[in-house]
Amino acid sequence: MMERVKTTALIILVVLSLIQSYFLAYSFPNLGARVKVEQEYVLTETMGQKQRVEHVIFPEDIVLHAGGNRHTLLYPNTVTFNEITKRFEEVEFSGFLRHTADSYDWAKASTEGIGAELRFGTGVPVSLLQKVYNLDGDFLFLGDTIERIWVMKRPNQDTVETFFFSSDGKTVYESVREVFTLQDVQQFAGYGSYMPSYQLWRGSIYLPETPVETIESSFGYTAYSPEQMQRNLFFDPEKTRNLEDWNGSQIYTDGKRGLQLGSGGTWMVYTDPVAPLDSPNDLGENMLAGLQFVNQHGGWDGRHRYVVPADPADGRIILFQQYYDRYPVLGTEDFEYGHIRLIVQQGVVSEFERSLLTRGERSGRTTERWLPGSGSVIEELERYPRLREVVAVFPAQQVTPTDEGELHFAPVWAVRLSDGTEHKLMDALPAGTVLEQPLKKLPKLQFNKTGSSGVEGSGTDGGTGLRGNGSGGDSVIPLLPETGSSAGTPAEDGTN
């Protein structure tokens, strides 16, 4: 009996030994280095608005090509801009073919063809564009960064083509699935009929031929206190020490993290050092981590657009540009304002800077201002000391604090340089300026039944200045809208 018990026990021990050997051989312990991200456990109070990823990804502008070397620019937060972007969001792009950038004559297509060109500045990763647009392609396309989406009808062709331009400047993807019709493209081109015409300058910069109407405003504001940000960013605010930098800036630190206040206490820079890792950063994942971090630490003051920096530093720098009205917001050399910047590594935020001010109610009346047309802008550009570095020219709202405790928003022409920095180029015309000739807003452009150029009736442009230039390309013609048409009126874009 005893021998049987011993035998049974021995068998059980052998079986257990075999099971243990199996797990040791075929299961691997997690020996990878793990970074303890303590910032995930900070309990934060609700501060500011929250945003979703689709709210911060939208084009910097839209170029409408109407044929005959006629162009119009649309800016965010306008009726027509929203209509076109919504149309792009409703369709599905797939079946991409890859071309080299020099496969087509893009200059001729923009001059003589018709269509709409969505421009994303320095580009947006496809993985993030997929949060807004229906995109399906191979791993090369899905891993790329796109700076432009251009739907067009080229001269002497009846087909509609859609191209995605890589930010590397060498690759163009063509969506072979036809998602837009000829009528769609004609409608896009016709949207710009009642808006200022733009001329192409130096390859990719579009400038208005006539002054552009905009507004000047002032707002009250509220400010986050240093104590609020300490509670929001540090585990134990009671253990933080207050120091003063050599230039008078206030610094709060708990020995590891730091919070520095600049611009007179209205701008903060938070640092939380993270050990560098050898594995590459995913720009899309880092952007999502940065977005969530802002949601938890101060929120958003109005609308922002995600911007890929000129030098993204291997996907670590995440930048959000603030907007007011239709245009991006700029600070000054002495007053930081208008953007949120983060450094993110493997989804962990190591640096975070932003304004502590939140725009409040508008104070007083808005003032009508006019930004100068292309003639004055080009003259100013020719005098600009860093002209060779200019890659974009755009309207902006420059913000300065006033002695009355307000934020003053003034329209300006601004430039973006090749290093990604943005600077004021010139001010708007003085308030109260009366233009020599009133700017006439035109009726909506329509195509005739054949899609060819010409004007119904007399064959002229009726004084609108929209006659074709004889280049032989496609063009649109101005016709009065049908009675009872629900199409947007000129006033719609001017008030948004």
Image: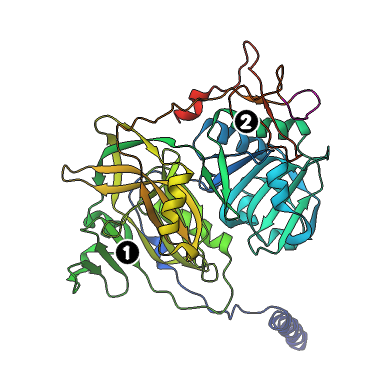
Nearest to the observer: residue 487 or residue 127: 487
Mark 2 residue element: loop
Q: Nearer the viewer, mark 2 or mark 1?
A: 2
Measured as percent of width and height from the top left, residue 146 is found at 64, 56
Q: Marks 2/1: CA distance?
A: 51 Å
Q: Nearer the viewer, residue 415 or 228?
A: 415
Residue drawn at the location 23% of the way across and 67% of the way down:
252
State the scheme by which the image is colored: rainbow
Q: Please indicate, yes or no, whether residue 142 appears anywhere in the rendered image.
A: yes
Disc 1 residue type (three-letter): Val
Identify the disc placed on residue 419. Answer: none
Left or right, residue 234 beside residue 70: left
Mark on residue 269?
1
Quadrant holding the C terminus:
top left
Amino acid beneath label 2: Leu
Total labels drawn: 2
* Residue drawn at (74%, 84%) of the image: 5
* Residue shown at the point (55%, 71%) measured from the top left: 314
Quadrant housing the N terminus: bottom right
Please indicate whether residue 203 sits to the left or right of residue 271 in the image.
right
Which residue is outermost to the top? 483
The circle on residue 466 is 2
Q: Position of residue 259 (x, y in %)?
A: 28, 65
Label 1 Cα neighbours within 10 Å, binned few <14 / some 14-19 / many ≥20: some
Image quadrant where residue 453 sits = top right
Q: Residues within 10 Å of mark 2 (few under 14, many from 20)?
A: many
> Is 30 situated above or below 315?
below
Q: Position of residue 340 (x, y in %)?
A: 40, 56
**363 displayed left or right of 331:** left
Report the span colored magenta: 448-454
